[in-house]
Amino acid sequence: MTSESTLTAPLENGFASDALLDPMVSKAIALIWHEATLLDAKNYVAWEALWTPGGKYVIPIDPDTDDFESGLNMIYDDARMRRMRVTRLTEGYSMSAVASARTARTISRFTVTANDGECVTLRSAQIIVGFKREKHLLLAADLEHRISFVDGEPRLDLKVVRLVNSEGAVTASGFLL
Amino acid sequence: MSTPLMENHDGFSALAATDRVAGQLYTDPEIFEAELEKIFYKTWVWVAHESEIPDKGNFKKAMIGRQPVIVTRDRKGALNVLLNRCRHRGASICEPDKGKANGFTCPYHSWSYSLDGQLRGIPYPEGYEGVIEKKDMPLQKLRVESYAGMVFASFNQDIEPLEDFLGDAKLWMDRFMMQGAGFGIKVQGEHKFRFDGNWKIQLENTTDGYHFPIVHRSWMASVDAETADMLSFMTDENAVTHALGNGHSVAIMVPEHVELDADDGTEELQERFRHIIDELSETMPADQVRRIVRSMHGAGFNLNLFPNVAMSMSFFRVLRPISVNETEVQHMALGLDGGPESVNRERLRIHEHFQGPFGFGTPDDAEAWDRVQRGANGNPQMPIMVNRGLNRETTGTEGWKTSHVTDESGMRESYSQWKKMMGND
């Protein structure tokens, strides 16, 4: 029989079996899956509304860095760049966005790396399969989400997408990860 | 439409005329194989910028056609370009993209080589006594020369000196480097992507001003008015393309930024860089601040160097042919070596805004190029037209064929060199 005390005791490798049961964490994961649904549906206007005003959306090239400012990234968006990006993807003038691949993505393998009662930071794995003009494409990435709770509602405050092939050739695409 | 290009099968060179090229230049695998042999393994191919290998022991990998090479700076500080292939059984001896090393050791049987390619060690050498001498088995070395920090290599040991090959392009390479604004130029990082199309589609694009406001409308809409205005060259009669010979050409988009060292003081600095101006002004004289900020977008032109590199405003664009219908492109962001950190960061943000697989420009270019390849499969014998501006092409005192930047003089220059190199002899 499992008692509450054994649930809360982390194992030696840092695994805390009940970390995902925290109600804030559950809400954070629900937001991440909701975000994935919006991105697959290319509902970028609704996606933009999920962010905090100071939120950063990053697809770095260097697999190890957290200093996104001083290196080259594939995406390094603050609210202003996000606004322009959503406009570009929705206004119909970008031929790559108009012809972008249809995608289906799954996110799993969640681990909680921080939870201070106001912010939850989660790591996960994402697999995206896309299809465009007779060809499938496959993108795998480690994700990091920092979810901030503003008035009890979860919001995206940081999203880092570390593609497994970030230092290799990445297919140019008209959709978001 | 007549298709006279296809009547003559006396070598592939007949497939390129002055004003048009055969569509099968994009689609025929035989032509692609011949291009590797007659162009990529015969001429000077760009492999590195010296800032990528600044110190003794630095190396980077590169590709020339399908052949893997290592660019090294040896213990004497000299540049070497070595085939990345062990002399014993052919394994690659270097797999990291770049780094620092004392030499290279093959992972298979531990044959070890120095940075200049000499075979230094063979384990258990008894089996080779009287069979081989180490001095006879160095890594294959390519010819290597550099100009303005740009390192080129060639498999062709008899090739003309690099400076002769670059010819009039040297002037423009010097002008390009003026964006250092008193500092050296360094590579800050690179985007890498592939598209499903022939390499020459990308080669043409760097000198194609005509597509810019159409393909890049969404990028133009996202930048500030001053930047958009700076790149409004469609009706600017000073925005011209010069054919420089040997396949090279320069497309001038921002005529006032051709020579960044020259400044008549009339240009207003862009308001978007106000935070940089204010920060630099705390420690730098006003003329130096102005010099750096005027260079923030790079040089006012794209210099296309046949066959595989362009010095494109503020970055290098390197192309690598993978197959007849697949090409890899690198966009290398440039910064000021030893320059202000804030300036280099701003240049990274400018680069990210347009370039890379998720930039506001590159994905639309890649989509256009994919579409060219798909379309060119339809009647591959129908010509690709490169005749725009033939009606207004002139030859100036420098001997450069010149037309408007939206014209196709640069492409005609590339195909002229292609035709020369693809002949039977």
Image: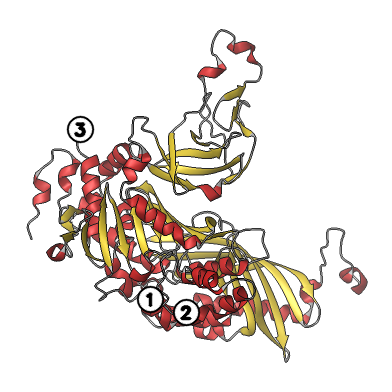
Amino acid type indicated by mark 1: Met
Q: Kindly indicate the quadrant of the structure image that contains residue B312.
A: bottom left
Instruction: State the residue position of label 1.
Output: B230
Quadrant (top left, top right, bottom left, bottom right) of the N terminus of chain A = bottom right
Residue A39 visible in the picture: yes
Q: Nearer the viewer, residue B410 or B296?
A: B296
Dot 2 falls on a residue whose secondary structure is: loop
The chain letter for the residue carrying disc 1 is: B
Instruction: State the residue position of label 3.
Output: B425
Q: Of callouts 1 and 2, which one flags the residue occurring earlier in the amino acid sequence? A: 1
Q: Are marks 1 and 2 in contact (CB under 8 Å)?
A: yes
Quadrant (top left, top right, bottom left, bottom right) of the C terminus of chain A = bottom right
- For label 1, the crowd category at 10 Å Cα-Cα, with few meaning under 14, some 14 to 19 and many 20 or more, is some
Q: Residue at x 32, y 41 (%)?
A: B164
Amino acid type indicated by mark 3: Asp
Q: Position of residue A92 (x, y in %)?
A: 37, 80
- For label 2, the crowd category at 10 Å Cα-Cα, with few meaning under 14, some 14 to 19 and many 20 or more, is some
Instruction: State the residue position of label 2.
Output: B270
For this orientation, the residue located farthest to the bottom is: A151
The answer to whether marks 1 and 3 sit on the same chain is yes
Left or right: B339 with respect to B355?
right
Q: Kindly indicate the quadrant of the structure image that contains residue A13.
A: bottom right
Q: Quick check: B126 above or below B239?
A: above
Question: How many angstroms separate mark 1 from mark 3 (CA)?
Answer: 46 Å
Q: Position of residue B377 (x, y in %)?
A: 24, 56
Q: Residue at x 12, y 65 (%)?
A: B391
> Residue A54 got which mark?
none
Q: Of callouts 2 and 3, which one flags the residue occurring earlier in the amino acid sequence? A: 2
Left or right: B140 with respect to B59?
left
Left or right: A162 with respect to B418?
right
Q: Quick check: B87 above or below A99?
A: above
